[in-house]
């Protein structure tokens, strides 16, 4: 009888080894220090830590709501959810771009690491859905990121139909304002983000804003700090703390901010999209 031992030994030796996820505590420490991981391609088992010289942020009181985007929000073309399909959003963000713009930096190892953060309540997603011809909701856009204290670090977003990622970002800004967030990090500036109000600052300036958003709430925080020198008006200052609704200015986090946003829209006798369009028009 032929022995199977050589075959088993060969399979064991040559089977691919799945690299361990990034330790969640290390990953959160990196974000709190202004650093984040990337990979060279989807199947890359290695990661490298990035500390850009220039950093993109989106001031929460400076979101550019165009007339066309406001119309899209008011018409309710998309249903928007929070943390309903985190893994699917990450997978869509990591998929090859239609314009063939190159390999995704979201490796399988990075995706697994953020999935673990999501399970720990430290990574979140927003999803945009639209019914197909059979009336079945289909995921057509969304974004994900990491949240802590009064900070949200946006990682990536995707869109399968026009305006889906813009709608997700508009909901994100509105929910973060409701949550008492002060700093929305976008990592790198792009023309798309710039058209929505993102600005580029030095990494040194970013770290200062990051530290302020992690300190005990003072009623000033990032908003005044950004206006001092940069004139960016980043954050929402006292208004954000009041919006949190707990009296001490502690941030609620994206999921709670999203729920509070829906509750406020329901109390206004307005559709969520119309309520968000109105609120963003008032703050931008």
Image (cartoon, grey):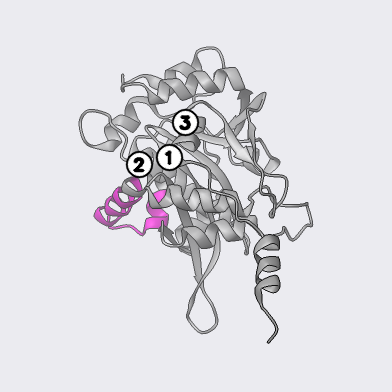
- With respect to residue 154, does 222 lie above or below? above
Q: Secondary structure at mark 3?
A: helix
Task: In the displayed orientation, state which residue is furthest to the left.
Answer: 247
Badge 1: few (under 14), some or many (20 or more) residues near its Cα, within 10 Å?
many
Separation of disc 2 and disc 3 at Cα? 18 Å
N-terminal of the pair, mark 2 or mark 3, is 3
Q: Quadrant of the rendered structure where residue 250 is?
A: top left
Q: Residue at x 33, y 25 (%)?
A: 238
Residue 177 visible from this viewpoint? yes
Magenta region, residue range: 257-277
Tell me, yes or no, whether the two marked residues, 1 and 2, touch with CB atoms within 8 Å.
Answer: yes
**Left or right position of 3 against 224:** right
Residue 149 in percent (x, y) is at: 37, 32
Q: Name the residue nearer the viewer: 90 or 284.
A: 90
In the rendered image, residue 127, in percent from the top left (x then y), is placed at: 48, 59
Query: Helix, strand, or loop for circle 1?
Result: strand
- Gap in Å between the C-alphas at discs 1 and 2? 7 Å
179 relative position to 49: left or right: left
Q: Which mark is residue 275?
A: none
Q: Which mark is residue 147?
A: 1
Q: Nearer the N terminus, badge 1 or badge 2?
A: 1
Earlier-in-chain disc, 3 versus 1: 3
Name the secondary structure under disc 2.
loop
At which x and y percent is residue 163?
59, 57
Q: Give the foreground label among 2 and 3.
A: 3
Q: Depth-wise, is mark 3 or mark 1 nearer the camera?
A: 3
Q: Main secondary structure of the magenta part?
A: helix
Image quarter hosting the N terminus: bottom right
Q: Which residue has dot 2 on it?
A: 253
| Relative height, residue 13 to residue 283 (above, below) | below
């Amino acid at each position: 009888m032929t022995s199977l031992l050589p075959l088993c030994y060969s399979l064991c030796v040559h089977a691919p080894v799945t690299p361990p996820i990034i330790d969640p505590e290390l990953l959160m420490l990196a974000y709190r220090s202004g650093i984040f991981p990337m990979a060279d391609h989807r199947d890359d088992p290695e990661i490298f830590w990035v500390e850009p010289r220039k950093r993109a942020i989106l001031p929460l009181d400076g979101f550019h709501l165009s007339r066309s985007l406001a119309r899209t929000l008011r018409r309710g073309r998309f249903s928007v959810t929070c943390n309903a399909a985190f893994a699917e959003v990450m997978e869509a963000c990591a998929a090859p771009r239609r314009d063939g713009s190159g390999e995704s930096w979201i490796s399988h190892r990075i995706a697994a690491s953020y999935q673990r953060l999501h399970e720990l309540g430290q990574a979140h997603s927003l999803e945009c859905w639209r019914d197909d011809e059979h009336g079945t909701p289909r995921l057509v856009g969304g974004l994900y990121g990491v949240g802590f204290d009064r900070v949200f670090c946006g990682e990536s977003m995707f869109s399968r139909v026009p305006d889906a990622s813009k709608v997700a970002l508009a909901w994100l800004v509105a929910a973060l304002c409701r949550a008492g967030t002060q700093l929305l990090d976008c990592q790198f500036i792009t023309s798309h983000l710039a058209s929505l109000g993102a600005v580029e600052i030095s990494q040194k300036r970013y770290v200062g804003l990051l530290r302020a958003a992690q300190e005990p709430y003072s009623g000033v925080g990032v908003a005044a700090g950004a206006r001092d020198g940069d004139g960016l008006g980043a954050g929402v200052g006292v208004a954000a703390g009041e919006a949190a609704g707990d009296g001490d200015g502690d941030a609620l986090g994206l999921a709670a901010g999203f729920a509070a946003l829906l509750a406020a829209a329901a109390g206004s006798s307005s559709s969520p999209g119309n309520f968000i369009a109105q609120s963003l028009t008032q703050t931008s």
